[in-house]
Amino acid sequence: MKIDRLIGILSVLLQEEKTTAPELAERFEVSRRTINRDIEDLCKAGIPIRTVQGTGGGISIVNGYRMDRTILTSKDMQMILAGLRSLDSVSGSGYYGQLMEKIQAGSSEFISGRDSILIDLSSWYRDSLAPKIETIQNAIGDRHLIRFRYYASTGESDRTVEPYYLVFRWSSWYLWGWCKKRKDYRLFKLNRMDKVHETDKVFECREASMPDLSNEKIFPGGIKVKALFDADQKWRLVEEFGTSCFSENDDGRLLFTADYTDMDNLITWIMTFGEKAEVLEPEEVRVKIRAMIEAMRKNYSRRK
C-alpha cells in the first residue's frame, strides 16, 4: 500500500545519510518512476527532501531535519519490537519481519540484552487466519468492500461489508465493519468467516466510531447463575473468572456466582465440567441439562 511505502521511505531517509532512487526501488519492489512520485508526495507533505543528480548524488533529508532517536530508550525499543513480533506471529506476509529488521538495524545501540516480553498471537487456526487478516488489512487500506460467507448460531449467510478495524479481543480476531445486509455496524469473528475476498469496489469511508468492546456492551449479562464445583476445579474458575467469582463451602465445594449472557453458552460451559459441577440456579438451566443428559444417555445406549 502506498501509505506504508511512504512511511518506509521516510524511515530510510531518517536512518541513513543518503540513498538513491534505484536503491529505494529495489528495496520496496516498485519502479524508479514510482519512487520519484513518492518523493514528490513527501515534499508536498512538508518533508524537506533534497535530491542531487550525478555521481555522488542521491536523496536525503536536509540538515537540521532529523529525528533524534535518543528520545526512545532501550525499554521503548523493546516494547516496540515486542508489539511487532506479536503482529508478525499472525501475519501472512513478511512485512512486520522486515519492519523489525529496519528498526533493529537503525537502533542497534538502543537494543541490548534478552527480550523480556514475548507475545505470540497465533493459534491453532493460523494457516486459515493469516490469509484472512492480510486480505482484510489490504481492503481497509484500499477502502475496498469485502465479501465472505458467515456462520452464526442463527444460520449462515453471504455478507458484503465495509471493513474499518481488525480487532483482537477475548483471545480471538474480529472484523468491525458496516454490514450492507444489516445496514449497521457489526462485529464478525474471523473464525466464522469463509471465502473472504477483497472486491474492486471502492466505498466512501464513513465516520466510523471505534467499536465498544467493553464486557458490559458485548456481554451484558442478565442470567444470574449459581453453581457448585468440586474443589479440584478451582484452577479453572480462577483462570476464567478470577478469584472473586466463588466462595468455599464447609464441605470444600466452591459456590460460583456470575452473570451470563447466553443460555446455550452457559450450558455448554457447565457440561465441560462433567460430574464436577452442579447448577443450582436458574431452574431452567437445570431442566435443560437434565434433558440433554437424557438425550446423551439414549444416544450412547444404542447398539449398532
Image (cartoon, rainbow, N blue to C red):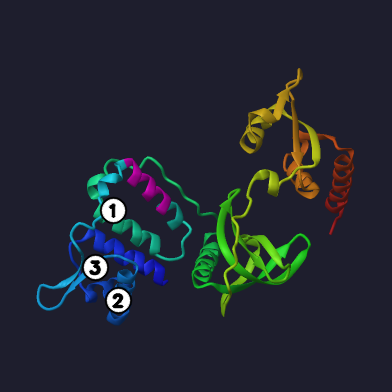
SS at mark 1 in the image: helix
Which quadrant of the figure has residue 281? top right
For marks 3 and 1, give the CA distance.
24 Å
Label 1 crowd (10 A; few <14 / some 14-19 / many >=20): some
Q: Residue at x 69, y 44 (%)?
A: 216
Q: CB under 8 Å between callouts 2 and 3?
A: no
In front of the other: 44 or 168: 44
Q: CB under 8 Å between callouts 3 and 1?
A: no
Where are the magenta residues, as a range? Answer: 75-84
Q: Residue at x 53, y 71 (%)?
A: 139
- The kind of residue on which mark 2 rests is Ile
Name the quarter where the N terminus is drawn. bottom left
SS at mark 3 in the image: strand
Main structural element of the magenta stretch: helix, strand or loop? Answer: helix
- Name the spot of residue 39 as percent of width and height, x first: 29, 73
SS at mark 2 in the image: helix
Name the mark on residue 69.
Answer: none
* Residue 79 painted magenta: yes
- The kind of residue on which mark 3 rests is Ile
Name the mark on residue 104.
Answer: 1
Q: Which residue is mark 2?
A: 35
Q: Which residue is mark 3?
A: 49
* Residue 125 painted magenta: no
Label 3 crowd (10 A; few <14 / some 14-19 / many >=20): some
